[in-house]
Image (spheres, helix red, strand yellow):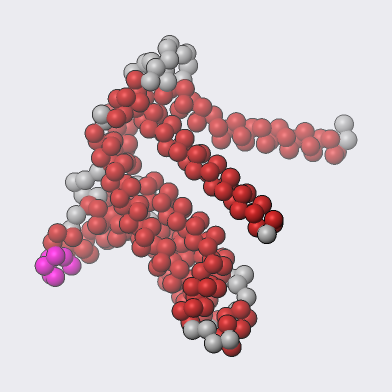
């Protein structure tokens, strides 16, 4: 066997093993969601049922946790993307000698353990809301949004900054020479260029917020999110309702990804035709 054939066989075997390890948990989860036993079981198949999806609809703790997670994720995204955009623009405008210090300060929330972020958020806002008389802000949803925004906005900044580093400043200079205002330059040149990074930031913000557990455990207080409900159920034993929920989430994600790909290809073909 030649070295080239051995290399191709080895690569294909590694790729097949990688895909198997990646997809095996999803296949097991999907099988257990349609299997009849009252605990997650992929094999043997004792029967086919949709009962776990029906029971999922009346699992009020899961529904409440998912609803709170979506509310928090939307609020975190609405705050983190503009903050990350502003931080990335400031980073690109700073002098070289100040960028290292600014970058260290901006990146520190992401490097801070979630437990510390959660405890610090609770302590800070407990005292602050008492001092300013806005005690209604001391609730799980607000605290979770405040805690998650600190590090999710840093993630957005890094994504946007990577795109912004490929931006040609001469476009802004040409627009200024033609009489455009800074606001017109930002809305007509900078934002369209950053659109792919902004879309990526929105998607990653939503996913990062929904799956966040460490900080949310402390900041959610007496309320629930999807991750805290799942963690609580692990302690007492899982049921196939969890698998049913996972199947729905994965299905919606795949549908969204396929729809986005179809839209992107259609847009690309239309642009080439024009």
- Please provide percent x and percent y for residue 99: 51, 77
Between residue 239 and residue 56, name the one nearer to us: 56
Residue placed farthest to the right in the image? 2
Q: For the stretch drawn in magenta, what is the main secondary structure?
A: helix
In the rendered image, the residue lying farthest to the front is 274
Residue occupying the point 49% across, 61% down: 198
| Quadrant of the frame with the N terminus | top right
Instruction: Work out whether residue 112 can be spotted.
Output: no
- Give above or below for 113 relative to 224: below
**Screen quadrant of the C terminus:** bottom right
- On screen, residue 257 above or below 204: above
Front one among 201 and 21: 201
Where is residue 157 drawn, in percent x and y? Answer: 47, 65
Q: Is residue 244 visible?
A: yes
The residue range painted magenta reads: 128-134
Q: Quadrant of residue 147?
A: bottom left
**Measured from the top left, where is residue 153 in percent x and y?**
41, 63
Q: Residue at x 64, y 54 (%)?
A: 270
Q: Nearer the viewer, residue 118 or 255?
A: 255
Residue located 51% across and 69% down the image? 191
Image coordinates of residue 145 in percent, x first then y, are 30, 57
Q: Residue at x 30, y 25 (%)?
A: 55
- Would you identify the image quadrant in which residue 33 lies? top left
Query: Is residue 189 covered in magenta?
Result: no
Q: In the displayed structure, does residue 264 sit left or right of residue 241?
A: right
């Amino acid at each position: 066997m030649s070295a080239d054939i051995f290399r191709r066989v080895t690569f294909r075997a590694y790729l097949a093993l990688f895909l198997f390890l990646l997809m095996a948990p999803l296949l097991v989860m999907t099988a257990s969601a349609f299997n009849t036993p009252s605990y997650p079981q992929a094999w043997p198949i004792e029967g086919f049922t949709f009962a776990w999806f029906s029971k999922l609809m009346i699992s009020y703790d899961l529904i409440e946790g998912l609803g709170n997670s979506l509310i928090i994720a939307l609020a975190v995204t609405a705050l983190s993307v503009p903050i990350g955009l502003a931080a990335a623009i400031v980073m690109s405008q700073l002098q070289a000698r100040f960028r290292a210090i600014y970058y260290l300060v901006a990146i520190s929330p992401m490097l801070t353990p979630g437990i510390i972020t959660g405890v610090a958020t609770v302590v800070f806002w407990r005292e602050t809301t008492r001092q300013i008389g806005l005690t209604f802000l001391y609730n799980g949803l607000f605290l979770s949004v405040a805690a998650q925004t600190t590090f999710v906005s840093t993630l957005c900044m890094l994504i946007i900054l990577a795109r912004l580093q490929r931006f040609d400043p001469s476009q802004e200079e040409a627009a200024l020479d033609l009489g455009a205002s800074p606001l017109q330059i930002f809305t007509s040149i900078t934002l369209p260029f950053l659109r792919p990074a902004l879309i990526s930031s929105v998607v990653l913000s939503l996913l990062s917020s929904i799956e966040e557990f460490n900080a949310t455990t402390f900041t959610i207080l007496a309320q629930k999110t999807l991750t805290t409900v799942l963690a609580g159920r692990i302690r007492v034993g899982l049921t196939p309702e969890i698998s049913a929920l996972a199947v729905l989430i994965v299905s919606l994600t795949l549908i969204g990804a396929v729809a986005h790909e179809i839209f992107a290809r259609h847009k690309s073909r239309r642009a080439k035709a024009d």
